[in-house]
Image: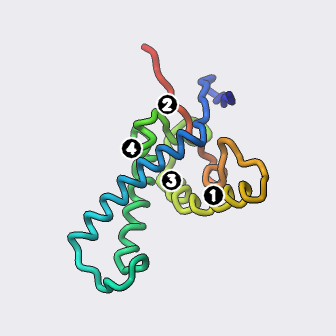
Amino acid sequence: MQAIYLKSGERVVPASLRMRAIAFIIDAVLIVTIAAIADYYTVSSNEATFVWKPETLIYIVLGWLYFAGAETSAVQATLGKYLLGLQVVDKHNNRLTFKNATIRYFARPLSIMIMLMRFVRGLPVAKHRYFHNRVTDSNVVKQARHHT
Protein backbone atom coordinates (compact mmCIF):
# COMPACT_ATOMS: atom_id res chain seq x y z
CA MET A 1 0.00 0.00 0.00
CA GLN A 2 1.34 3.37 -1.02
CA ALA A 3 1.46 6.22 1.47
CA ILE A 4 2.09 9.91 0.97
CA TYR A 5 3.86 11.86 3.69
CA LEU A 6 3.11 15.53 4.00
CA LYS A 7 5.13 18.32 5.55
CA SER A 8 3.13 18.02 8.76
CA GLY A 9 4.20 14.38 9.03
CA GLU A 10 0.60 13.18 8.61
CA ARG A 11 0.35 10.03 6.53
CA VAL A 12 -2.43 9.78 3.95
CA VAL A 13 -3.28 6.74 1.86
CA PRO A 14 -4.43 7.24 -1.73
CA ALA A 15 -7.86 5.85 -2.56
CA SER A 16 -8.03 2.81 -4.82
CA LEU A 17 -9.51 2.95 -8.30
CA ARG A 18 -12.30 0.62 -7.16
CA MET A 19 -13.37 2.91 -4.30
CA ARG A 20 -13.20 5.97 -6.55
CA ALA A 21 -15.28 4.22 -9.23
CA ILE A 22 -17.95 3.21 -6.70
CA ALA A 23 -18.06 6.79 -5.36
CA PHE A 24 -18.40 8.11 -8.91
CA ILE A 25 -21.27 5.71 -9.64
CA ILE A 26 -23.11 6.91 -6.50
CA ASP A 27 -22.58 10.53 -7.58
CA ALA A 28 -23.62 9.81 -11.17
CA VAL A 29 -26.84 8.14 -10.03
CA LEU A 30 -27.60 11.19 -7.85
CA ILE A 31 -26.93 13.67 -10.67
CA VAL A 32 -28.87 11.63 -13.26
CA THR A 33 -31.82 11.31 -10.87
CA ILE A 34 -31.90 15.06 -10.26
CA ALA A 35 -31.56 15.73 -14.00
CA ALA A 36 -34.34 13.24 -14.80
CA ILE A 37 -36.67 14.89 -12.29
CA ALA A 38 -35.84 18.33 -13.70
CA ASP A 39 -36.32 17.03 -17.25
CA TYR A 40 -39.68 15.52 -16.36
CA TYR A 41 -41.00 18.79 -14.96
CA THR A 42 -39.68 21.01 -17.76
CA VAL A 43 -40.80 21.27 -21.34
CA SER A 44 -38.01 20.68 -23.80
CA SER A 45 -37.76 22.95 -26.77
CA ASN A 46 -36.98 19.97 -29.00
CA GLU A 47 -38.33 16.63 -27.83
CA ALA A 48 -36.99 14.81 -30.94
CA THR A 49 -33.39 15.17 -29.79
CA PHE A 50 -32.40 12.91 -26.94
CA VAL A 51 -28.90 13.98 -25.96
CA TRP A 52 -28.21 17.51 -27.19
CA LYS A 53 -31.24 19.37 -26.01
CA PRO A 54 -30.81 22.99 -24.93
CA GLU A 55 -31.22 21.79 -21.35
CA THR A 56 -27.99 19.77 -21.66
CA LEU A 57 -26.03 22.89 -20.72
CA ILE A 58 -28.02 23.09 -17.50
CA TYR A 59 -27.05 19.49 -16.67
CA ILE A 60 -23.37 20.19 -17.33
CA VAL A 61 -23.52 23.23 -15.04
CA LEU A 62 -25.38 21.16 -12.41
CA GLY A 63 -22.66 18.49 -12.49
CA TRP A 64 -19.90 21.10 -12.35
CA LEU A 65 -21.42 22.91 -9.38
CA TYR A 66 -22.08 19.62 -7.58
CA PHE A 67 -18.58 18.19 -7.98
CA ALA A 68 -16.60 21.44 -7.65
CA GLY A 69 -18.75 22.70 -4.80
CA ALA A 70 -18.66 19.46 -2.83
CA GLU A 71 -14.92 18.94 -3.28
CA THR A 72 -14.20 22.46 -2.01
CA SER A 73 -16.61 22.18 0.93
CA ALA A 74 -15.57 21.48 4.51
CA VAL A 75 -15.85 17.69 4.00
CA GLN A 76 -13.79 17.88 0.76
CA ALA A 77 -15.93 15.18 -0.84
CA THR A 78 -18.98 14.53 -2.95
CA LEU A 79 -21.72 12.41 -1.40
CA GLY A 80 -20.30 9.24 -2.97
CA LYS A 81 -16.77 9.94 -1.73
CA TYR A 82 -18.07 10.92 1.71
CA LEU A 83 -20.05 7.70 2.09
CA LEU A 84 -16.93 5.69 1.23
CA GLY A 85 -14.62 7.67 3.52
CA LEU A 86 -12.69 9.47 0.77
CA GLN A 87 -11.79 13.10 0.30
CA VAL A 88 -10.07 15.29 -2.29
CA VAL A 89 -6.97 17.13 -1.13
CA ASP A 90 -4.31 19.33 -2.65
CA LYS A 91 -0.59 18.58 -2.35
CA HIS A 92 -0.55 19.91 1.23
CA ASN A 93 -3.62 17.92 2.34
CA ASN A 94 -5.75 21.07 2.27
CA ARG A 95 -9.01 21.86 0.53
CA LEU A 96 -8.91 22.47 -3.20
CA THR A 97 -9.64 25.92 -4.49
CA PHE A 98 -12.82 26.28 -6.53
CA LYS A 99 -10.64 27.02 -9.58
CA ASN A 100 -8.72 23.74 -9.18
CA ALA A 101 -11.92 21.81 -8.52
CA THR A 102 -13.38 23.29 -11.72
CA ILE A 103 -10.32 22.34 -13.76
CA ARG A 104 -10.41 18.88 -12.19
CA TYR A 105 -14.09 18.44 -13.16
CA PHE A 106 -13.63 19.45 -16.80
CA ALA A 107 -10.37 17.44 -17.15
CA ARG A 108 -12.02 14.23 -15.84
CA PRO A 109 -13.41 13.09 -19.25
CA LEU A 110 -9.95 13.41 -20.80
CA SER A 111 -8.52 11.46 -17.88
CA ILE A 112 -11.04 8.66 -18.46
CA MET A 113 -10.19 8.58 -22.18
CA ILE A 114 -6.46 8.33 -21.43
CA MET A 115 -7.08 5.52 -18.94
CA LEU A 116 -9.25 3.61 -21.44
CA MET A 117 -6.72 4.04 -24.24
CA ARG A 118 -3.95 2.70 -22.01
CA PHE A 119 -6.14 -0.24 -21.02
CA VAL A 120 -7.01 -1.08 -24.65
CA ARG A 121 -3.37 -0.89 -25.70
CA GLY A 122 -2.37 -3.18 -22.84
CA LEU A 123 -0.33 -0.54 -21.05
CA PRO A 124 -0.36 -0.25 -17.28
CA VAL A 125 -3.01 2.08 -15.88
CA ALA A 126 -1.96 4.48 -13.13
CA LYS A 127 -3.18 3.35 -9.74
CA HIS A 128 -3.75 6.65 -7.97
CA ARG A 129 -2.70 9.80 -9.86
CA TYR A 130 -4.79 10.34 -12.96
CA PHE A 131 -4.59 13.18 -15.47
CA HIS A 132 -7.22 15.36 -13.77
CA ASN A 133 -5.38 14.98 -10.47
CA ARG A 134 -1.96 15.73 -11.95
CA VAL A 135 -3.19 18.87 -13.70
CA THR A 136 -4.56 20.26 -10.42
CA ASP A 137 -1.88 18.73 -8.18
CA SER A 138 -4.61 17.02 -6.16
CA ASN A 139 -5.30 13.52 -4.90
CA VAL A 140 -8.19 11.44 -3.61
CA VAL A 141 -7.29 9.89 -0.28
CA LYS A 142 -8.88 7.93 2.51
CA GLN A 143 -10.19 10.37 5.08
CA ALA A 144 -7.80 11.08 7.90
CA ARG A 145 -9.31 9.92 11.17
CA HIS A 146 -8.31 12.26 13.95
CA HIS A 147 -8.11 10.57 17.32
CA THR A 148 -8.71 12.78 20.32
Q: Is residue 81 above or below residue 43?
A: above
Residue, disc 1: 111
Q: Nearer the viewer, mark 1 or mark 3?
A: 1
Mark 1 or mark 3: which comes first in sequence?
3
The Cα–Cα distance between marks 1 and 3, rounded to whole angstroms, is 14 Å
Horizontal side of residue 28 vs 93, given as left or right: left
Mark 3 or mark 4: which comes first in sequence?
4
User: Do the CB atoms of the residues marked 2 and 4 lie less than 8 Å apart?
Assistant: no
Residue, disc 3: 101
Within-10-Å neighbours for mark 1: few <14, some 14–19, many 20+: some
Name the secondary structure under disc 1.
Answer: helix
Q: Nearer the viewer, mark 3 or mark 4?
A: 4
Name the amino acid, label 2: Gln
Q: Position of residue 134 (x, y in %)?
A: 66, 50
The Cα–Cα distance between marks 1 and 2, rounded to whole angstroms, is 23 Å
Residue, disc 4: 79
Residue, disc 2: 143
Mark 2 or mark 4: which comes first in sequence?
4
Viewer-proximal residue among 99 and 41 = 41
Residue at (57% x, 58% y) in the render: 108
For the view shown, which residue lies furthest in the top direction? 148
Mark 4 or mark 1: which comes first in sequence?
4
